Image: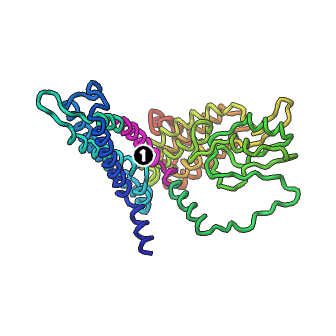
């Protein structure tokens, strides 16, 4: 048990991997120096690596720069820890410190430093510009520097990706899933399908649907002479082994591998194909600016509403796909959940209305957007806008006690409270 505790402590420590890299750097330095000695310091011509003075300067510069890079990575790691503690949870710190890419980056920089320090001792200067230069060790230092530059760029990218909420959640989720498989290996009895129910193709891994290969899925359904129903919508999270497709009709010759390859699963939704996710991001910005109070930062909320108004204005008269995809013969081969006009309106305005109804700036801008959309939208799409206007009036009256404040807050103003505030803002 003591050995197990020691092993867990060592492998989960920030210093373990860098120490191993330092030892590797020492071994690499001694190995290259030994090779130089075997070849009489003539394995690499001095015309390529320079004389003793140049080699000393190069190795000294490499050593100094690697110390700076190692300090930079440690500093970034500590900043990430502080941000994670403040923004997410103090209990996530241990998992961040166990991040192997960070440990490998630190280890590589320190190993390069050790190699350069040990190699510079082997340079012999006779005082007249000649002497012994460990060419293999110097070339190895060059290679390590190039690798270090590449690792630095990759590390910065990795840290940027790791600071996303979805990445931290996935980090803990994956580790917990692995532990779950270890502690509870028995998966239990499989779910039995109901007689006559469509065949179900389950997801192999969890993730958010970020891309759908419609053409490939239609071709495969046509080849197998069946109809595919994609269960999760674009941008929706699907757990591992959850229903991914329902297959209607004959499915004996269906290639499940192609079905899985036709979907792109990521940690979070993206703007590559998902318009609703762009709307969601704008709503999140507006909500965050109103999180503590409708008066916290209403100007930011208004700016987000400007963009939401623009997006919905572009959608107001456009036809929406019904989620049914047909082959060349016109037969339906694939159905997927699709966003509707009502869904976009609810997504864009519901939460902002609830969070910001107490702010005249937000309510005035929201009223202006809804009124403008009502005049532009197709007749069958006006009902949801009228409903939003009624809800806005009710929410504003509830948030404000004075009737005059209510009248001001329900005036139409695209600036929130701007030039239109001097007009008669009384509600009809």
Locate residue 137, reporting x and y percent: 30, 38
At horizontal 56% and vertical 44% (from top left) the residue drawn is 280
Looking at the picture, does residue 3 appear above or below residue 328? below
Q: Is residue 160 magenta?
A: yes
At horizontal 46% and vertical 48% (from top left) the residue drawn is 162
- Mark 1 nearby-residue class (10 Å; few <14, some 14–19, many ≥20): some
Q: Is residue 16 magenta?
A: no
Instruction: Examine the rendering and report whether any part of residue 7 can be seen.
Output: yes
Prevailing SS of the magenta stretch: helix
Instruction: Examine the rendering and report whether any part of residue 346 can be seen.
Output: no
At horizontal 15% and vertical 27% (from top left) the residue drawn is 129
Looking at the picture, does residue 423 appear above or below residue 107? above
Disc 1: which residue = 159
Side (left or right) of 427 relative to 418:
right
The residue lying furthest to the top in this view is: 47
Locate residue 13, reporting x and y percent: 38, 60
The residue lying furthest to the bottom in this view is: 1
Residue closest to the eye, 417 or 8 = 8
Total numbered circles: 1
Split into 4 quadrants, where in the image is the N terminus? bottom left
Looking at the picture, does residue 52 appear above or below residue 408? above
Residue closest to the eye, 377 or 219 = 219
Q: Secondary structure at mark 1?
A: helix
Q: Magenta segment range? A: 145-168
Side (left or right) of 307 relative to 225:
left
Split into 4 quadrants, where in the image is the C terminus? top right
Residue closest to the eye, 116 or 395 = 116
Side (left or right) of 224 relative to 2:
right
Locate residue 246, reporting x and y percent: 78, 49
């Amino acid at each position: 048990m003591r050995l197990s505790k020691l092993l867990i402590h060592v492998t989960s420590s920030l210093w373990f991997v860098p120490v191993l890299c330092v030892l590797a750097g020492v071994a690499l330095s001694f190995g290259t120096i030994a090779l130089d000695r075997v070849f009489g310091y003539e394995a690499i011509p001095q015309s390529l690596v320079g004389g003793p003075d140049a080699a000393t300067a190069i190795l000294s510069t490499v050593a100094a720069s690697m110390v700076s890079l190692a300090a930079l990575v440690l500093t970034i790691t500590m900043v990430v820890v502080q941000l994670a503690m403040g923004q997410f949870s103090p209990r996530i710190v241990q998992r961040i410190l166990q991040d192997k890419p960070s440990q490998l980056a630190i280890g590589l920089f320190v190993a390069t430093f050790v190699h350069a320090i040990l190699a510079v001792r082997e340079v012999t200067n006779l005082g007249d510009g000649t002497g012994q230069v460990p060419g293999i060790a110097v070339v190895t230092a060059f290679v390590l520097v190039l690798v270090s530059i590449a690792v630095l760029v990759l590390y910065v990218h990795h840290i940027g990706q790791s600071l996303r909420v979805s990445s931290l959640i996935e980090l803990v989720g994956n580790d917990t899933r692995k532990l779950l498989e270890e502690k509870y290996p028995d998966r239990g009895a499989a779910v039995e399908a109901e007689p006559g129910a469509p065949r179900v193709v389950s997801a192999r891994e969890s993730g958010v649907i970020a891309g759908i290969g419609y053409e490939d899925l239609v071709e495969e359904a046509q080849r197998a002479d069946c109809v595919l129903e994609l269960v999760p919508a674009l941008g929706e999270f699907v757990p591992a082994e959850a229903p991914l497709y329902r297959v209607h009709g004959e499915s004996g010759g269906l290639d499940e591998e192609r079905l899985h390859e036709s979907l792109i699963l990521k940690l979070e939704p993206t703007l590559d194909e998902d318009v609703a996710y762009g709307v969601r991001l704008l709503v999140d910005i507006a909500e965050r600016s109103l999180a503590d109070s409708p008066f916290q930062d209403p100007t930011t909320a208004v700016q987000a509403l400007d963009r939401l108004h623009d997006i919905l204005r572009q959608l107001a008269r456009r036809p929406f796909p019904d989620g049914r995809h047909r082959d060349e013969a016109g037969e339906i081969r694939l159905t997927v959940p699709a966003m509707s006009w009502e869904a976009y309106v609810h997504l864009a305005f519901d939460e902002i209305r609830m969070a910001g109804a107490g702010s005249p700036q937000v309510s005035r801008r929201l009223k202006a957007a809804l009124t403008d959309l009502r005049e532009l939208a197709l007749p069958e799409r006006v009902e949801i806008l009228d409903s939003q206007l009624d809800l806005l009036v009710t929410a504003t009256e509830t948030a404000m006690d004075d009737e005059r404040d209510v009248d001001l807050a329900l005036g139409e103003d695209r600036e929130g409270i701007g030039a239109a505030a001097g007009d008669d803002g009384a509600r009809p």
